[in-house]
Image (cartoon, helix red, strand yellow):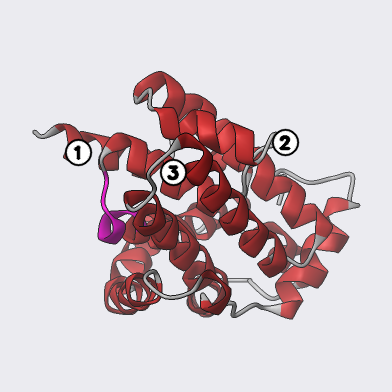
Amino acid sequence: MSATTLAMLLLGDGRLPSGGHAHSGGVEAAITDGRIVDITTLEAFVIGRLSTTGLTEASLAAATVHALTGTTTADHTRDVLAVLDLEAEARIIAPALRMASRRLGRQLARVAGRCWPHPVLASLADAAPDGAHQPVALGACGFAAGVGVQAVADLAVHHAVSTPAQAAVRLLGLDPYAVAALTADMASLATGVAAAAVAAATGPFAELPAPNGPILDIAATEHAGRDARMFAT
């Protein structure tokens, strides 16, 4: 097994101590609101999330790897990462989701620093002292680990599908085999989203995709104020 393959498997593993297990991708709020009640409604939710937030995050992550490939100095790297982080900030509307994204990015960079020490991670910390947004951190960590643009986009899309799917198993007690099959059935759509993210990665940062789901933002804001919840988001 190559080091790059192992790095991709680690970054895609929900057991990596980066904090992802504490997030449901909006599923807990959707269950509370009655928008997800079974496998059919979960499928609709995942498709919607993948086509909006999933595309946005995959594009930011892929663009980060692409941009880092062309940086020449530590200062240049820091400046590029800072701009990308601002682009991520502009695409995350709800304050609760902004906080969660930075927390996840900070934790991901921390574990990546132990796994794949690289100067780019120091530049990431300089660019975003409070923690870079998660998709930018994923791109930087992927770059540090030698994972390319396509692979990082695939990883972002994988998380966009698997995070809500697995949370639904825990929250609703859905058949895990049926949920696994649902995840596998997303392959064609996921491939298209990742391809769109890679295509956008070479363009101007300001023109990166920014589709969003307003109901996700509203639900995330309400969810953050609830006392009884299993997941942070």
Calculate the distance from the C-alpha at mark 1 to the C-alpha at mark 3. Answer: 14 Å
Where residue 155 sits in the image (x, y, percent)?
36, 54
Residue found at the very far left of the displayed protein: 1
Quadrant of the rendered image containing residue 41: bottom right
Residue found at the very far top of the displayed protein: 114
Question: For the magenta stretch, what is the residue range?
Answer: 147-152
Q: Which residue is at a point 60% across and 57% down the rendered structure image?
A: 83
Check the image and report above or below for 224 versus 179: above
Q: Which residue is at a point 57% across and 48% down the rendered structure image?
A: 79
Residue of label 1: 4
Q: Are marks 1 and 2 in contact (CB under 8 Å)?
A: no
Where residue 68 sits in the image (x, y, percent)?
39, 49
**Left or right: where does residue 181 sit relative to residue 46?**
left
Please tell me which of labels 1 and 3 falls first in the chain. 1
Quadrant of the rendered image containing residue 63: bottom left
Q: Which mark is residue 130?
A: 2
User: Is residue 183 visible in this depiction of the protein?
Assistant: yes
Residue of label 3: 140
Numbered disc in front, either 1 or 2: 2
Foreground of the two, 231 or 72 = 72
Where residue 176 sits in the image (x, y, percent)?
40, 54
Calculate the distance from the C-alpha at mark 2 to the C-alpha at mark 3. Answer: 16 Å
Q: Which residue is at a point 43% across and 49% down the rendered structure image?
A: 139
Assign a secondary structure to mark 1.
helix
Q: Which mark is residue 126?
A: none
